[in-house]
Amino acid sequence: MGFEYICKKKNKDCMFSKACEYGIRASIFIATKSSEGVRVGIKDVAKEIDSPEPFTAKIMQILTKSGIIHSAKGVGGGFEVSNQALRSIKLIQIVDAIDGDSIYKGCGIGLKECSEVHPCPVHNQFKKIRELLLTMLTTTTLEELALGVNSGDFHLKIFSQNK
Amino acid sequence: MGFEYICKKKNKDCMFSKACEYGIRASIFIATKSSEGVRVGIKDVAKEIDSPEPFTAKIMQILTKSGIIHSAKGVGGGFEVSNQALRSIKLIQIVDAIDGDSIYKGCGIGLKECSEVHPCPVHNQFKKIRELLLTMLTTTTLEELALGVNSGDFHLKIFSQNK
DNA sequence: CATATAAAAGACAAATTTATCTTTAATTAG
DNA sequence: CTAATTAAAGATAAATTTGTCTTTTATATG
């Protein structure tokens, strides 16, 4: 046919890029381990969140450069989140670092010039969604997500091995 | 550095793929013209919505195959939306046809197994957003978007030439 | 200090999305 | 019926995102 390759996007599962999805999943996993005082290596991270290891390593570099995750080289090294950071880090920091702010700032149909004074046709329809998304990202902490996983109520894998 | 090409996604401006953004913009423009009883060619569509013409033509093929937009070949041909369709067509039909349903159905962090009974760590946070998005897409009609543009309240271009 | 370990960095490759170009098919008008 | 017009279809190319591999750098330990 010749055009089917256009539609039904494969990678863009939803809101975020694959890189950002991996980044969020990795951060949550590292947070669950850090709350137990355990550092984890990239191998464990990739295995746990079911992501390609080298690609995940790249994403970890972004997160460490952004100061979201702490890393240590050498024997006994790995990734961790400080107790202080665990409480202060919000989901939006991870998203911003990897995907940028377009998801909650950009125009719903990609217009460069779209604002309250010059709205696109779907501006009002998307306004509430962007606001809700921004609020959610701004208020959700890494700690609460990690706690949810540690308690066994929420899962990063199909079969929970946390309890 | 070697990893900057990963982050700050360029195309994925926001919710939808470029193809879907073009598709929505094109549909709205065609609807505004159809409400005036005028058919428009692919050239006019691409010019009006500021999109690459051949790519837009491909997207139009999806929309015509999906029965959302009607097309006519030959002299005086072009694209149009019937008065009947104008009222019945919802935004979700365009999105479904081009991007599929992952944006309002998929897991926020890309897990295949994510549901009410086996929720991912951000499941509850994303629930409201997905619901709001689905409701918005399901209730917004092509007609109301076209009316907004025709009235001059909303814009597909930077400088409105509609009034 | 030498060695092992583990992240960082850089180069490269594959897959996907976006964009372009050419040819074909359908329709209208003369 | 022929020519002009316009969308459809198909092939190809460019850009972007995702994924892989190798080398380098930093750190802990003996």
Image (cartoon, coloured by chain):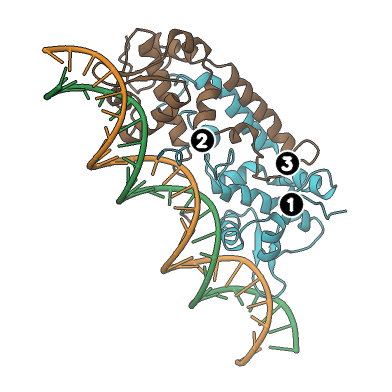
Chain colours: A cyan, B brown, C orange, D green
Q: Amino acid at mark 1?
A: Gln
Residue D15 position within the rendered picture, expressed as x and y whole percent measured from the top left? 37, 48
Above or below for C12 versus B120? below
Chain letter of the residue beneath label 1 in the structure image:
A
Q: Residue A161 appears at what percent x and percent y?
A: 83, 55
Q: Quadrant of the C terminus of chain B?
A: top left
Marks 3 and 2 sit apart, C-alpha to C-alpha, by 22 Å
B4 relative position to B34: left or right: right
Whether residue B1 is visible = no
Report the residue that reaches farthest toward the right.
Answer: A163
- Residue sitting nearer the eye, A22 or B102: B102
> Residue shown at 64%/56% (left/top)?
A51
Give the residue type at disc 3: Cys
Residues at badges 3 and 1 in contact (C-beta under 8 Å)? no
The chain holding disc 3 is B
Which residue: 77% across, 43% down? A144
**SS assignment at label 2:** loop
Q: Which residue is mark 2?
A: B14
